[in-house]
Image (cartoon, helix red, strand yellow):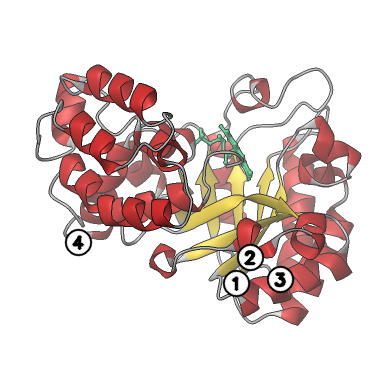
Amino acid sequence: MMEWTDRHCRFFHRLLTRRALIYTEMITTGAVIHGDRARLLGYDPAEHPVALQLGGSEPAKLAECAGIAADLGYDEVNLNVGCPSDRVQEGRFGACLMAEPALVGDCVAAMKAKVKMPVTVKCRIGIDDQDPEPALDALTAAVEQAGVDALIVHARKAWLDGLSPRENRDIPPLDYDRVYRLKAAHPRLPIVLNGGIVELEQAAAHLGRVDGIMMGRAAYQEPWRLLAVDPDLFGEAPPFASPKTAAEALIPYIEREIARGARLHAITRHILGLFRGVPGARAFRRHLAMEAVKPGAGVAALRAALALVPDVGAPAAHTAAA
Ligand SMILES: Cc1cc2nc3c(=O)[nH]c(=O)nc-3n(C[C@H](O)[C@H](O)[C@H](O)COP(=O)(O)O)c2cc1C
């Protein structure tokens, strides 16, 4: 998610779940090819498994970027066919590609020819006045034919004309049944459902109908939920017993990053929702938001903020308090 899932965020999320696949922000092919690669594509080995999401629509450039991603050791490369922003439409990629399934197929085929790792696509169920039945069928047929390894479907349309990107994440209604029908029609193609999933119970219910689920805003805004992913969805022990112990485990990373020139706030901004619903959460957030932006702020500010919240055990404590 742009501006959100940078490498600091991903490192933190990986402390909360060992099993979930983590995605980068969308990075355009132009930025990958001409930009500061270390800054845009650098990641910590602890983030694995991590997928690089690309924005673009030129098969040769996407193939080149997929090759770069493979050289850097990414675990998956994903093509964005869902982002509705104007900037993206001008570049003729993102959600407007829903209207060009053959081109998306060519993009996937070019990437598949270049790399051995999984190549996936993230799309909407349709755009503007498209009928989601044929529109999603056409896109799916094109990418399946090209050998796509999985299709992630944000289960609502994008209205490119008239809605802002933010409105496009809420206003077009969710249509999970459309995605279930897609799965039923493509039993061999892994289909991942995205959109509006907050509780892991919801996720578990969807998993009876599709192969995977993707969480966006709930994972970012209330990252404590991720601590339940390994136990609830994978039947494995959580990496940490509580959100507080997970936050403490971030301290050595912060010290390392600050020594390399990072600002404290650039890291701690991603953990502000960690205690949402728990007594002391507001004080934690306020302390960190005010102190971490100060010049020279270090881990002492995080330690002081953590002293304001109790070490509540299971994530269930949040649900109870929320
Ligand atoms: C701040 C923000 C940035 C986003 N950036 C991206 C992006 O770079 N690539 C993408 O595929 N989706 C992006 N999204 C959309 C989410 O991945 C997701 O599809 C959408 O929020 C619906 O899922 P959710 O209800 O679980 O959040 C972004 C969403 C937000 C809130």
Mark before the other along the chain sequence, 2 or 3:
3
Q: CA distance from mark 1 to mark 4?
A: 25 Å
Mark before the other along the chain sequence, 1 or 4:
1
Closest to the observer: 231 or 321? 321
Q: CA distance from mark 4 to mark 2?
A: 27 Å
Q: Amino acid at mark 4?
A: Glu
Is any part of residue 210 visible from this angle? no
Mark before the other along the chain sequence, 4 or 2:
2
Q: Is ligand 1 within 8 Å of the beta carbon of the residue shown at mark 2?
A: no
Residue matched to label 3: 66
Mark before the other along the chain sequence, 1 or 3:
3
Residue matched to label 1: 118
Q: Amino acid at mark 1?
A: Pro
Residue matched to label 2: 77
Q: Secondary structure at mark 4?
A: loop
Q: Residue furthest front?
A: 296
Rendered image quadrant of residue 162: top right
Mark before the other along the chain sequence, 1 or 2:
2
